[in-house]
Image: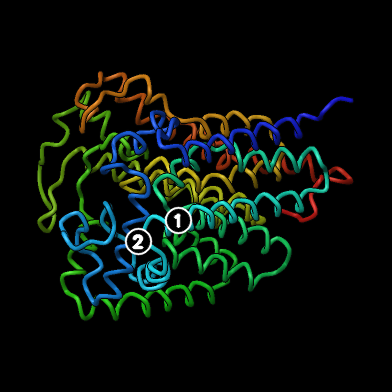
Amino acid sequence: MSISRGRLLLILGIAVHLVFLASLIAPSHFLNPLFIEGTHNLEEGQGSDFYAFYQAGRYVLDGEDIYQRPMDDPDRVVPYAYFYRYLPFVAYTLGVALNALPPRASYWFWVAVVEVVLLLCVLATRRMATDDDLGCSLAAMWLLFSPFYIEQYMGQLTFVMAALTFAFVVTYSRGQTVRAEWSWIASVIVKHLTVLYVPIFVRLRRFRPVLLAGALLILTTVPYFAFRDAGVDQFSHDNFNLSLTPMPGNLGLVSLMMTLKDRFFPGASEPFGSIQGIKLSMTRIMVLVTMLAPLLTGLWVTFRRKPVDLVELVSLWTMTYFMVFREVWEYHYVLMMPVLVLLYARTRARILWLFFALLAIPTPFVFYDVPGPNPQVHWSAFEHVLNHSFKIVPLVGLFIWVAAGYARRHARRLDARPDDGLAVTL
């Protein structure tokens, strides 16, 4: 009795995910050499982002500024932590709640919560597919994605936002509009990256969720900053400063462009003028063009192409994040998990497995890592470009594939079948 390809993929996915968990638990964290953030990190490193949330919650309980630097605070309750750079809401809710347990126990509790969220996504995907082989293949996509490992190692909450995006698309496709909109609102409040979906709601003429999300952001943010001027300055500096230095773990398009500039066109940063104190240079113009291209493409597809294809639009605007934001870390690529699952469910296009494989595997970092705090100073030009392009180049390729309409063409072929293998119309 032969086993279907989908079941083989699912077995492989379960095995790989168990390896992820084993590396998280093992003191050696044997998968860490594959990841920049697993090797070049604070102190021991495990949970360093999570402890930022935890310490921010403790600052809330103690009535202190949540944006102060934990590593400069001798009275911090966590062993180490990156600084908190998110909106106050998460500190006042999740951060405070996590303080019910000691830091280390709280970290493992959060790892377990995220694992449960992943399991719910897998189960929902299996229920979404009426074809067993398809359902197993889609479930395997959730389990084989290596950035999920580093997401858990760092103790991040990006995957929760990705899961809310998946819930948004699936529930909207089922006609559960209000429930879908609240999934999106929750994702915006959690980490505000999905604010990029606003054009989708405008195209759908669904202004209520946009207004609600805006009102909740104001209500949960403005009162805090109104009474803590220092918090405003620190939050602005951490999130909106114009520094474009390509850090080794930054794997977005802006960082790739800066790497190419630094290695091949260093003179491009020489200023030739200024506008209201902001220096103008070829570098900044190049970065601006790089950011405008996906934004304008996304807007054109959103408002000119008919009929509305929710999977297409969510895919494009999710990928836009990686091309316009200044800092993109490897764990951020978990945002692509629902995109790849939904695109494959919608189209069954084989080329998506190529894009999936390139985004799911770790970068080749292990082959050019150099011990020490700044490995990039020892890299050749080729290693620099390879490191910063490995994830973003296939993502740009997928963006072009979707924007050019190939997802729609494959979907039309499936629509002609009496049974496309899905219980919902994506």
Task: Answer with left or right where residue 120 lies relative to residue 357.
Answer: right
Residue with the mark numbered 2: 53
Please, what secondary structure does the residue beneath circle 2 have? Answer: helix
Residue 20: percent from left, percent from top:
52, 37
Residue sitting at x 73%, y 30%: 8
Q: Mark 1 or mark 2, which has the lower sequence index? A: 2
Q: Which quarter of the rendering shows the N terminus?
A: top right
Foreground tag (1 vs 2): 2
Residue 321: percent from left, percent from top:
42, 49
Of the numbered discs in the image, which one, if any, rests on residue 157? 1
Task: Answer with left or right where residue 364 lies relative to residue 21.
Answer: left
Q: Does residue 181 lie above or below 350 as drawn?
A: below
Residues at circles 1 and 2 in contact by the CB criterion of under 8 Å:
yes
Label 2 neighbour load within 10 Å: few <14, some 14-19, many 20+: many
Please, what secondary structure does the residue beneath circle 1 have? Answer: loop
**Which three-letter amino acid code belongs to the residue tagged 2?**
Phe
Residue sitting at x 60%, y 49%: 312
Q: Does residue 94 lie above or below 36 as drawn?
A: below
Q: Quadrant of residue 75?
A: bottom left
Label 1 neighbour load within 10 Å: few <14, some 14-19, many 20+: many
Residue 62: percent from left, percent from top:
25, 75
Q: Foreground residue, 57 or 291?
A: 57
**Which three-letter amino acid code belongs to the residue tagged 1?**
Leu
